Image: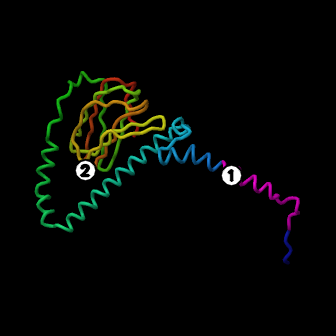
Amino acid sequence: MHNTNVPPQSDLPTSSQLQRSTVIALVAAIVILVTVVLPAEYGIDPTRVGGVLGLTEMGEIKEQLAEEAAIDAAADAAAAQTAASAPAESAEVAAATPAAGQESTEAQPPASPAADEWRDEMRITLEPGQGSEVKLSMKLGEQAQFSWMAEGGAVNFDTHGDGGGQNTSYEKGRNVPSDDGVLEAAFDGNHGWFWRNRGDATVDVIIRTRGQYAEMKRVL
């Protein structure tokens, strides 16, 4: 009743076979980590395979979202701490904030070329909490003039670049209704803007560009 089939010794793997299988599994895990996990999750691409597969850009976007969420959380925590430690001062600041916010929202964007003088224009609708990203394909030292504005509110933004395993942030802002200027590529790659709508209403972001770049594309 208690008989069991014991496999013969010849069918069992030897110590050397087990060691070889362990080494193969470890090497495979390292390869997957370097070529897939690091680019897709953290935007780190030492082999550049992730860039070919489109994983690096995915990881960089995740890192940007995580960084923005951390900044918002820190700002909310600081605001809560200020309100708790100095309620009277907080009330005065709260009374002054709407006027300052209204002035910022209603301020006219800086003078820019007429619409027909721009090379590219794109309109992006952002629901509350939604983010989007637009990039220009540029080479080192190329310059692109840009102008963007948020209709219906203000947005958080991050002007940055990535490519060839490199990444950089040119400028960041919170609750900004518009921005314009000249974007100069720090290296060959994709350079542009990430916006997030942290308000309660839908916002349309209109971006116009011209200058030295191959193409404009929406990547998120």
In terms of sequence position, does the residue under pointer 1 or pointer 2 come before the other? Answer: 1
| Residue at the far top in the pictured view | 117
Could you tell me residue 178's position as x and y percent? 22, 38
Task: Indicate left or right for 76 with 137 as reference.
Answer: left
Tally the numbered discs: 2
Question: Closer to the camera, 189 or 53?
Answer: 189
Using the rendered view, name the quadrant where residue 192 is placed: top left
Q: Nearer the viewer, mark 1 or mark 2?
A: 1
Q: Residue 7 lies in magenta, yes or no?
A: yes
**Circles 1 and 2 in contact, beta carbons < 8 Å:** no
Find disc 1 in the rendering and name its residue. Answer: 25
Using the rendered view, name the quadrant where residue 152 is placed: top left
> What residue type is disc 2 on?
Gly
Residue range in magenta is: 6-27
Q: Residue 188 lies in magenta, yes or no?
A: no
Residue found 15% across the figure and 67% down from its top: 87
Q: Which mark is residue 199?
A: 2
Residue found 83% across the figure and 60% down from its top: 12
Image quarter in which the C terminus is found = top left
